[in-house]
Amino acid sequence: MTTTLITGANKGLGLETARRLIEAGHTVYAGMRDTSKGADAAALGAKVVQLDVTDEKSVAAALAGLPAVDVLINNAGIVGSHAGADEFGADDLAEVFDANVYSIVRMTKAALPLLRESINPVIVNVASGLGFPRFVTDPNRVESTISGLGYMTSKAAVIMLTLQYSKMLPGIRVNTIDPGYTATDLNGHNGHQTVTEGTDAIVAMATIAADGPTGTFSDRDGVIEF
C-alpha cells in the first residue's frame, strides 16, 4: 500500500487531496501545525501528524514517527504580506519564503531516507501559475492581473527548486503543480474552481508510475510547457 505524507492537510487543497488519495487506497498521514484542527482529516481515515514545516525539530520529529513514505506532497504555505512596494520589506519576503520554499527543503531532506526505501518514490510540490512568468505576462490570463512581491516570488522559487531536485534525485519522481484559481481560505474562497478541481493535478502527480514524468510543471489539463 502506498504511504503518503501531506503537509498543510487540515483544510483546503491538503484535506481534499487526503480524501481523494485515501479513496484511491493510500495510507495518508495528514501533517498540520495544530492537531486540534485535525478532526476532518481523521474522519476521512487519515493519520494526523503534528507538523510545523517552518520548524526543523517539528519536521524531524514528524518524519521520525513514520514507518514509510512513498509520496511526499509539499502543500503547506501562506500568502504572506500584501504590502505595496513602498512598505514591503525583506522580513516580509523571508516570512513567506520560510513557509513556502524553505519548508520544501526541510521536508525533502528529512523525508529522503524513507523515500529512498520506496519502490516508487514521488515528491509533489504545490506551486502556482502566479509564479510562472509566461502566465503572469499573458494579458489573457487572470495571473497577469494580480500583483504581489511575496507569494508570487516564492512560488516561482518552488518551480525552480523542483526542477533542480528532479535533476539531483534521478531515482525519485519530483514534479510541481499549479492547482489553478481554487476557492480556498488562501484567497478568501474567491477562486472559480472547486477544491476537487484544484487537486486534480496534485492527485495525478501523486499517483504516477515509476516510469512517470519528473521535473514537470502541470495543471489539471496536463503538463505545461516551460
Image: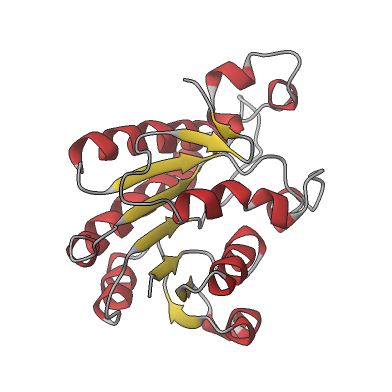
Residue at x-position 50% and y-position 55%: 75
Residue at x-position 54% and y-position 19%: 133
| Residue 168 position by quadrant | top left
From this view, report whether residue 142 is shown above or below residue 208: above
**Viewer-proximal residue among 53 and 43:** 43
| Residue 85 position by quadrant | top right
Give x and y (percent) for residue 6.
46, 65
| Residue 54 position by quadrant | bottom left
From this view, report whether residue 90 is shown above or below residue 59: above
Image side of residue 76 versus residue 59, left or right: right
Give x and y (percent) for residue 74.
44, 55
Assign the N terminus to one quadrant of the image: bottom left
Residue at x-position 63% and y-position 14%: 137
Give x and y (percent) for residue 138.
67, 14
Colouring: secondary structure
Residue at x-position 44% and y-position 57%: 73
Give x and y (percent) for residue 34.
53, 78
Instruction: Report the number of numbered marks.
Output: 0
**Viewer-proximal residue among 24 and 142:** 24
From this view, report whether residue 54 is shown above or below residue 136: below
Image side of residue 83 versus residue 224, left or right: right
**Viewer-proximal residue among 43 and 105:** 43
